[in-house]
Image: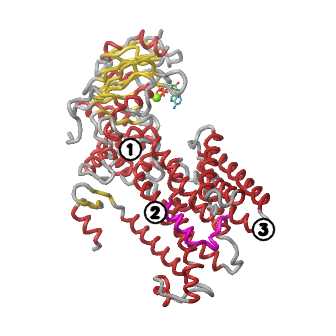
Amino acid sequence: MTPLERTAASGPRGVVTLGSRVALPVHGRQLLVGAVVVLLTAVASVATLSLGELGIALADLPSAVTGGADGADAFVVERLRGPRLVVALGTGAALGLSGALFQSVTRNPLGSPDVIGLASGAGAGAAVVALMMPGEVPVSLGALVGAVAAMVLVYVSTGSGFRNPGRLVVAGIGVAAMATAFTQYVVYAVERDKATALTAYVNGSLAARSWDDAATIGVVLLVVVPLALLLGRRVEIGEMGDELAGVLGAEPQRTRVSAVVLSIVLSAGAVAVAGPIAFISLTAPQIARRLTRGTGAHLALATLTGALLLVLADLVAQQSPIDDGLPVGIYTMAIGGVYLGWLLTREWRRGSL
Amino acid sequence: MSATGPVNGGGLRARGLSVGYGGEPVVRDLDLDVPPGGLTMIIGPNGCGKSTLVKALARAVRPVAGEVLLHGRDLASYRGKEAARHVALLPQSPIAPEGISVRGLVRRGRYPHHSLLRQWSPDDDAAVGEALERTGLTGLAEATVTELSGGQRQRAWIAMVLAQRTELLLLDEPTTFLDIAHQYELLELCAELHREGRTVVAVLHDLNQAARFASHLVVMDAGRIVAQGAPGEVLTAELVADVFGLACDIVPDPRAGTPMVVPHARHAAVVPGGAAR
Ligand SMILES: Nc1ncnc2c1ncn2[C@@H]1O[C@H](COP(=O)(O)OP(=O)(O)OP(=O)(O)O)[C@@H](O)[C@H]1O
Ligand SMILES: [Mg+2]
């Protein structure tokens, strides 16, 4: 018997109680899936640090990550792969949660920040700030402004806010294309070494990340995750439509605004440290939902799944025999593109698009 | 009757209520006292504002003028879940979250009884079980809502509203999608809730059903209440002609004695011996 089951035994079945104040239902399947996702993430993280030429031997890994390494191993852990891994974990988590929030309040599996131009907008904002006014304004602020601007454009150009799924996707794809074109313009106007700079703002990459990047995304998560979890139940009730959610007391309008704001902050944070990485925020919530076969926003599980997906994608990017210089964003784009196509056809067949 | 259920009848009133969706108000300067413990049925032509009125009574839309009073206090001043422990609404076309089971949907009706750290209350299982049983859905509890028939889905929504265990229930066209037997089953359920002392308000399109089951009949037209009272006094041939533009006879219902509408259909099959006009 696990400790959790024992606590549950003092209350009703499937509910964890703590005194008379706390009573939280637990869903066995969700816990199990969550544990498996965490385990897989741990395995992928170990692989990230130990595979390949520069990899740290498994036997040396425990001492290396606790600071007991020297020479080449220390360089790999402290400079090369350590920060990159932490940034991948944090960025993936941020993207997963961002997508789960946005998809839930738009009641639309395609209403995901990366599909509807939020990430591209953030990328454009970051490019402008980093290339046109280097050092004057923090890149993350540029990303945030770009993300907000893109969402305002989408909101206005659908004519019906975020409500109509079809229009949201069409307007979003348009805004995303415009933002990407704008980014290309900025990069070509300013930068001499165009190809590499462009890659960073259009595809998203985790190469050469620093502990500063890890700290940035860490702070974003530290602030936003608790707020998102507080909002979780209302977001879930909000899926029943504004009228009913209002009657049930879940304050749908306020909930939607809060969720969109949190989602934008998460995506902007992710873009600021890794560029616009495609499709993690689209797929992570959907995978989480399918794994648990349940309903609701699955905020926690989508967060964990996002981290797993990005670490896996980056592992492939680092170990790929094709070209080790290819940014991770290209891999997520390839996989996500296939998934998006499948999702679009399915929605279309069902007549909901 | 449940512990969290009815408390000395629900006092729900509208005063000078106007509600709109941006343009001209569709409910205009309306006064209504919902009789506590009564079974009120609202009838009226399409688009006259019935749904808008019940939504405003449940705080699903904000009035542009006037107010809704719950137990003498402005409904808008109630905190989030507090009002939801008094008033439940079945909207005309509710949205089921993707993949949700019947039990999952019904359980969401318990949301107003929960708090951030107490997302479970001792009455939950009993309330959900009772709601499923009263709507005949116990056997379908684990089915996915979106895969049910229209009528089964409608009953699942009604179960969700019942699970809320409020003293006031507002049902917007609860009989749509139901076959004739289930329509009467649902109307009987309303009558039963009424006998238990709960206040029930239902929007209905079938005038005969409304007249037969209502303790209080409210007739709406163009955003206003044009008549209300006991069905026997309210439902007249003149009123039906005025409000619905339908010529008819009113005869006593052979079973209940309540008024029954017999339209002057132009293309009725000719039955030998029938009083064709
Ligand atoms: N969400 C909305 N946005 C804009 N206008 C609306 C909205 N809902 C209703 N209306 C308008 O308000 C008027 C009253 O609508 P309401 O739904 O209250 O009518 P109703 O009496 O319930 O009709 P029905 O019998 O067809 O259900 C209609 O003219 C309708 O077009
Ligand atoms: Mg209506």
Label 3 in the same subunit as label 2: yes
Q: Answer few, some or many: residues within 10 Å of disc 1's Cα (few below 14, many 20 plus, some between 14 and 19).
A: many
Residue B29 x, y percent position in the rendering: 42, 17
- Residue B94 falls within the magenta-colored stretch: no
Chain letter for the residue marked with disc 1 in the picture: B
Residue lying at 53% horizontally and 27% vertically, measured from the top left: B22
Q: How many marks?
A: 3
Q: Locate residue A324, reporting x and y percent.
A: 69, 78
Q: Which residues are magenta?
A: A203-220
**Residue A62 falls left or right of residue B118:** right
Q: Chain of mark 2?
A: A
Numbered disc 3: what chain?
A: A
In percent of width and height, residue A135 lies at: 65, 61
Q: Is residue B75 above or below residue A133?
A: above
The part of the image, by quadrant, that contains residue B171 is top left
SS for dot 1:
helix
Residue B156: numbered disc? 1
Residue placed at 40% from the left, 17% from the top? B225
Q: Is residue B16 above or below residue A34?
A: above
* Label disc, if present, on residue B64 of the rendered structure: none
x then y, percent, for residue A125:
66, 54
Tell me the amino acid under the disc marked 3: Asp
The residues bearing labels 1 and 2 have C-alpha atoms spaced at a distance of: 28 Å
Look at mark 3 in the image and give the residue it sits on. A193
* Mark 2 residue element: helix
Above or below: residue B274 compared with residue B111: above
Q: Which residue is mark 2?
A: A301
Q: CA distance from mark 1 to mark 3?
A: 62 Å
